[in-house]
């Protein structure tokens, strides 16, 4: 598949898809983070021969960012040390990309294991460093997830905390940055409302209570699911805040 088509789809698809932020936490506080992005609804609206009448080949690829960075090590070595360090933190992340115009599937999963939920706080910030390396380029080579501006430029930093008794997810909002994000994305408000941002968290203990009243529980109360319009994630990130108290 042509890189230009892939970049176009990855950029546009964020306006018509479902994001699922999924976290699994084990008893010792270690766990796994997944960001699953399903843009199949967008693919269903596209003609089968989408570029110049040529049928594009399906993609089903899995790779690590460490492999990607090894290929781009010369470019990375020219960056400021602080930026290199942020990018290096992404080495343990993996990406699976699935795109098939015939079956109308467009999906990618971004995942990593973690030793503590606090390691996840800089995920999108570090991802944005890769975008800066491609700024002004027509194709994305260091950031295979395409244009993540709507994910990392909403004026907030996400803080996670877990101590075995409680868990919390909190957006620390920079009001100035949030206003800029709102101003730059207001024209997309109706489009964002058609997309979803889902939080799906799995815990080692049953949940006694959760501060977000819209949360749904699994039968064993060890999994909670919270769904929001993507517009709320972009314009009102604090709406995705919540605290969980576990049963003893």
Image (spheres, rainbow, N blue to C red):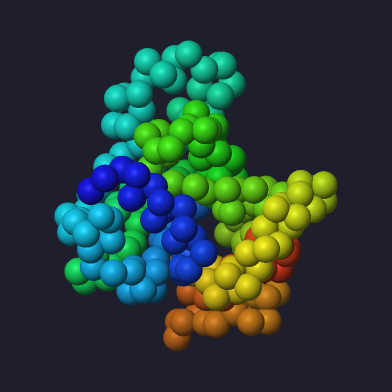
Establish if 44 lies above or below 234.
below
Taking depth in this image into account, of 139 and 167 the one nearest to the observer is: 139
- Residue 63, position in %: x, y? 27, 42
Left-right relation of 136 to 234: left
- Residue 41, position in %: x, y? 39, 73
Left-right relation of 123 to 68: right
- Residue 55, position in %: x, y? 18, 59
Residue at (55% x, 39% y) in the render = 128
Q: In this orientation, does residue 120 appear?
A: no
Residue at (63% x, 64% y) in the render = 188
- Of all residues, the one furthest to the front in this rendering is 52
Residue at (46% x, 82% y) in the render = 218
Residue at (54% x, 68% y) in the render = 197
Taking depth in this image into account, of 88 and 107 the one nearest to the observer is: 107
Establish if 205 lies above or below 219.
above
Establish if 49 lies above or below 229.
above
- Of all residues, the one furthest to the right in this rendering is 176
How many marks overall? 0
Taking depth in this image into account, of 210 and 111 the one nearest to the observer is: 111
Taking depth in this image into account, of 206 and 59 the one nearest to the observer is: 59
Q: In this orientation, does residue 141 appear?
A: yes
- Residue 87, position in %: x, y? 48, 30
Q: Quadrant of the C terminus?
A: bottom right
**Residue 53, image quadrant:** bottom left
């Amino acid at each position: 598949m042509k890189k230009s088509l892939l970049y176009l789809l990855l950029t546009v698809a964020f306006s018509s898809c479902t994001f699922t932020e999924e976290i699994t936490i084990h008893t010792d506080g270690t766990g796994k983070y997944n960001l699953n992005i399903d843009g199949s609804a967008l693919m269903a609206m596209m003609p089968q021969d989408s570029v110049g009448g040529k049928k594009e080949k399906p993609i089903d690829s899995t790779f690590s960012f460490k492999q990607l960075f090894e290929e781009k090590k010369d470019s990375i070595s020219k960056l400021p040390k602080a930026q290199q360090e942020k990018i290096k933190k992404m080495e343990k992340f993996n990406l699976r990309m699935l795109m098939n115009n015939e079956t109308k599937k467009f999906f990618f999963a971004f995942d990593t294991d973690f030793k503590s939920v606090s390691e996840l706080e800089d995920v999108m910030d570090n991802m944005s460093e890769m975008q800066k390396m491609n700024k002004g380029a027509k194709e994305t080579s260091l950031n295979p997830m395409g244009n993540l501006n709507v994910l990392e430029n909403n004026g907030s930093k996400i803080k996670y905390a877990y101590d075995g008794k409680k868990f919390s997810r909190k957006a620390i909002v920079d009001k100035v940055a949030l206003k800029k994000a709102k101003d730059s994305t207001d024209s997309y408000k109706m489009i964002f409302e058609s997309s979803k941002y889902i939080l799906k968290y799995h815990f080692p203990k049953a949940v006694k209570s959760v501060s977000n009243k819209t949360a749904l529980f699994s039968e064993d109360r060890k999994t909670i699911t919270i769904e929001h319009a993507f517009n709320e994630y972009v314009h009102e990130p604090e709406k995705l805040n919540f605290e969980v108290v576990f049963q003893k």
